[in-house]
Image: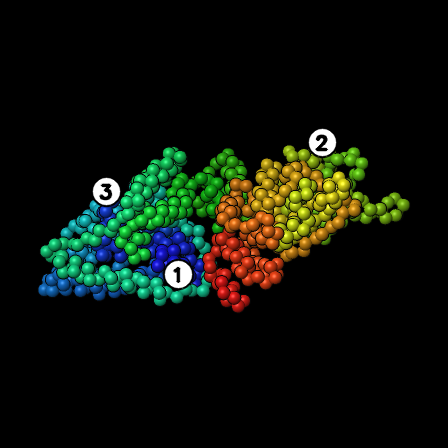
Amino acid sequence: MTIEEMIKVFSSQGRRVSDPLMNELILIYYGAILVNRYSCKKNVTGLSIDIKSFVLFFASSGVGKSFNIKTIEKAVCLEEYTGQMSKVFDIINKDDEQAFEYKGHLPSSPTTLVSGTKEGLFSISRSVSYARMGSLNALNDEIVDAIGSSNELLLSLKQGYDGEVKAKVKAGAKGDRVDSDVTDIVFNFLGAGTLGAASSDTIELLNALIVSGFFRRALVLESKARPEKSTIEPIDMTELKKWFFDLNDSKRDGFTERVKNYPQTGTIDTEMQIDPQAVLYIETIDIELLNRANDDQLSELKQYDTGSLDVIVNIAYIKCYIEGRMKVVVDDLKYAWSLFIRTRETCENTFKEIQSHEAVFDLLTKKDNLTHSDLLALDHSGSIPKQKSAWSDTILLVQELCYRKNKTLKMNKGIVARYTIEDLPKTNLNRLIISLSTDDKRERAIAYQVAEFRWDELPKLAVSHFRTELDQEGEEVTLGVESFCCAHFEESDTTEPYGHRKKDNYIQHANLIGLDFDDGRDTIDSIKEKFTGFKYLLYTTKSHNSKKSNYQDRFRVLIPTAHAFNVNPEQLKQMIGSFAEFFDLSIDSACRNASRLFYTNKDAEVYVNEAETLFDASGFIPDTISAEQLRTKMDNLKEITIDDDDEMERRIRGYVKYMVATVSVGVLRDYIHKMYMFIMDLTNKDLTLTIQALRAFQQGAGFPDEYLVEHSRNHGYEF
């Protein structure tokens, strides 16, 4: 089995959604135990021969950290550890009273719990050393508490990695006897914790990990997992357990032989081989580590990463071993490098000085309606400024950080200001933001009235109908709309009380996107296919299908967004540009401008797509987390090859892109079914093309096979 297959099985277990990366690190730790148990060494010149694993991971309380640790420990067939260790003492010296006494210190599993002191950490290490069982393996499932109670633990961990462990430990039946110093132990460590409850002193000690040099020796993950009920069907673990049973069984004879020969020859090491190309690739990784440090000289983490080559190579050997091979190849090292980078990327914010605006943001995401004084009382990092003079600058940075994360900072002013971080407001279809000019003589073309339209009023807007009023004689008069903008503008001295339609006066709050199609490349029919999944209005312009336009389609599209978006004019231009690029649209570039006006057309043909879903524009807002996630999805989609000359395949690709861009809005299973029904109808029930489209959707959106397998089972086809 591959390590990827193993992680898929482990991540499906339990009642709660599990972080696959967290399970991956736990498996690497237990893989190191197996490697050391059977005395396997690596043979790379210039690196340590021992294969050890140090892992720290931090995740929210209630995400099943302990459950995952126990599940993986059980799966790798180490339950019989205590029984085997007892047999080891019998083999070494049946009559040795001291050996018998050591049995009282045998762990019930291959991992001993850590109390936070050297004595607690190495309470069974003398037994391990005496019996040569392999390695000392230590676990702390709440490392934050252990570090907070004893900073001695950090030094002990570093010494354990360096092979410099030296501690007095108690052993034997007599609890008051102190045994000799412990040295020369191969030491593996797994620590888990919840950072949210850490005190400022503990955070400071955690940051001291970098200074101690431990960070470069360890894989450190800050998981973003949150407590959430799992909907994934658990994968049966029988095959996985058999894999590890066979892996252990193939090594047991050698292990027993090593124990029998111990008094005369000591340990018998098994040297794992490495492919010559893999040795060369180690040099490539070393160069990459140096490049990372040179490319970002201000990052303390990347400077310390230059000493991380040993831990990366260890991962490659562990992967190779648990996959049932004894020769490391280049792909093992590529995997190890990838895992190293993935863990580093998740924890860069953990091990650095916390900025004041980040501290405010984190606190307000956990609790709302807080005053400055409330925030100071909750601030364990000591980052929030006490002086009011620095507070206004911090709030500006908090607002910018909210924008990056598609949030908004709400300030309620009373006797004192109270702050709350909220999700971007959902669009109210009865309050679509529009500015309009009702003067057909254009005498006030720069002055635009602030208005809010209902969705069902937009067709009237497109054909120049604003509202009906009574004139001085009591007759009904229809006020026409000459032009409109999908935004509001601030008023000026010359335009009061109207808005001055120019970029500098653009108000950063909108919930409607306007697109202008005037070059004939996109037809009305093609847009209907591309936008089939979300709500929009399309109306034709005066030059539509005319001699002036060479009898081609000329039209505009108005799209309400799922949330109001707060962007400046340059960001709006980038947002609409990214949207057009994603859907392969040929739009008038001027419609990206914040002050862009759209003329109405009294003779327009109007088409309204009344889909339930509103378009989620958050993925296209530049420099935001959602945009970074969508960019990754777009990169995945680039690998999908579809014939541009085939009309049906173009329509399928357009629908796949829509699904990838909007999948976060609804429930994934619903989206899979929507795609299934759409493609089946489009292709006249061609199941082969439908499955290809579903696979493309999965490739872009990045969800596991289980969802597609479940859908195929529920609808009677084989995926």
Please report whichever mark, 2 or 3, sits nearer to the chain's N-terminal start.
3
Q: Does the rendering let one see residue 313?
A: yes
Answer yes or no: do the residues labelled 3 and 1 have beta carbons within 8 Å?
A: no
The residue type indicated by label 3 comes to Thr
Helix, strand or loop status at disc 2: loop
> Dot 2, crowdedness within 10 Å: few (<14), some or many (≥20)?
few
Image point (46%, 59%), residue name: 705
- The residue where tag 1 is placed is 9
The residue type indicated by label 2 comes to Asp
- The residue where tag 2 is placed is 493
Between residue 289 and residue 30, name the one nearer to us.
289
Image point (73%, 41%), residue name: 550
> Dot 3, crowdedness within 10 Å: few (<14), some or many (≥20)?
few
Answer yes or no: do the residues labelled 2 and 3 have beta carbons within 8 Å?
A: no
The alpha-carbon separation of the residues under discs 2 and 3 comes to: 77 Å
The alpha-carbon separation of the residues under discs 3 and 1 comes to: 36 Å
Locate residue 49 relative to residue 301 in the image: left or right.
left
Between residue 376 and residue 317, name the one nearer to us.
317
Between residue 89 and residue 660, name the one nearer to us.
660
Colour setup of the view: rainbow
Locate residue 531 relative to residue 44 in the image: left or right.
right
Locate residue 536 relative to residue 382 in the image: left or right.
right
Answer yes or no: do the residues labelled 1 and 2 have beta carbons within 8 Å?
A: no
The image position of residue 462, as x and y in percent, is 74, 47
Between residue 101 and residue 312, name the one nearer to us.
312
> Dot 1, crowdedness within 10 Å: few (<14), some or many (≥20)?
some
Please report whichever mark, 1 or 2, sits nearer to the chain's N-terminal start.
1
The residue type indicated by label 1 comes to Val
The alpha-carbon separation of the residues under discs 1 and 2 comes to: 67 Å
The image position of residue 423, as x and y in percent, is 56, 49
- Label at residue 45: 3
